[in-house]
Image (tube, rainbow, N blue to C red):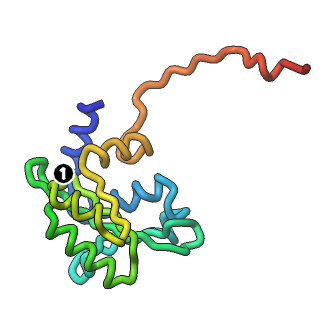
Amino acid sequence: MSELRSDLLEQILQQSPAFFEQLIVDLLVAMGYGGSQEDAAKRLGGTGDGGVDGVINEDRLGLNRIYVQAKRYAAHVSVGRPDIQAFVGSLVGHGSNKGVFVTTSSFSTPAIDFVRHLSQRVILIDGVALADLMIEHGVGVRVSRAIEIKRVNLDFFDLS
């Protein structure tokens, strides 16, 4: 599975920043946030995005919104505390207390420590966790072989 993780991250790094931002929104929808792609999630990245790359409804009704920041960095470049602080400032500016910060690399220890003491709920997803979530939810991957073995379901025939 580590080879698949590495291959996924390598493919992501070869894509555009806009592709990566959309990938994160697609992944969150696949994880069950928002309900459907059309009305529950959108990519905001680009000039004037206010430090937020995407927004997704936490639930189908849109009662809460989760803001997303996506940083596509090489494995040797970690996301530091200043990046997290800027994202938290964006959350405050949008009147939100929930955010997800995703990177293809890792987070520095000061960044991780900073998030632990926030009143806002900020989830950090590093490259390994990103690849694992993509695999788990079928985003950017496909099954190349499946084996199905059937047997009699004795519970089905138990009439007592």
Indicate the quadrant containing the C terminus: top left, top right, bottom left or bottom right: top right
The residue under the point 49% across, 60% down is: 33
The residue under the point 55% across, 74% down is: 63
Residue 37 is left or right of residue 90, and the answer is right
Residue furthest right in the image: 160
**Image vertical order of residue 9 relative to residue 147, above or below:** below
Res. 42 in view: no
Say which of 126 and 34 sits in front.
126
* Residue 64 rendering spot, x and y as whole percentages: 50, 73
Residue furthest front in the image: 117
The residue under the point 23% across, 38% down is: 7
The residue under the point 83% across, 18% down is: 157
Res. 34 in view: yes
Residue 127 is left or right of residue 78, and the answer is right
- Determine the secondary structure under disc 1: strand
**Image vertical order of residue 144 relative to residue 86, above or below:** above
Indicate the quadrant containing the N terminus: top left, top right, bottom left or bottom right: top left
Say which of 98 and 103 sits in front.
98
Label 1 crowding class (10 Å Cα cut-off): few <14, some 14-19, many 20+?
Answer: many
Residue furthest left in the image: 76
* Residue 147 rendering spot, x and y as whole percentages: 50, 20
**Image vertical order of residue 151 relative to residue 123, above or below:** above
Counting every numbered tag in the picture gives: 1
Residue 135 found in image quarter:
top left
* Residue 80 rendering spot, x and y as whole percentages: 14, 62
Residue 149 found in image quarter:
top right
| Residue tagged 1 | 106
Residue 29 is left or right of residue 22, and the answer is right
Q: Amino acid at mark 1?
A: Ser
Residue 142 is left or right of residue 130, and the answer is right
Say which of 117 and 3 sits in front.
117
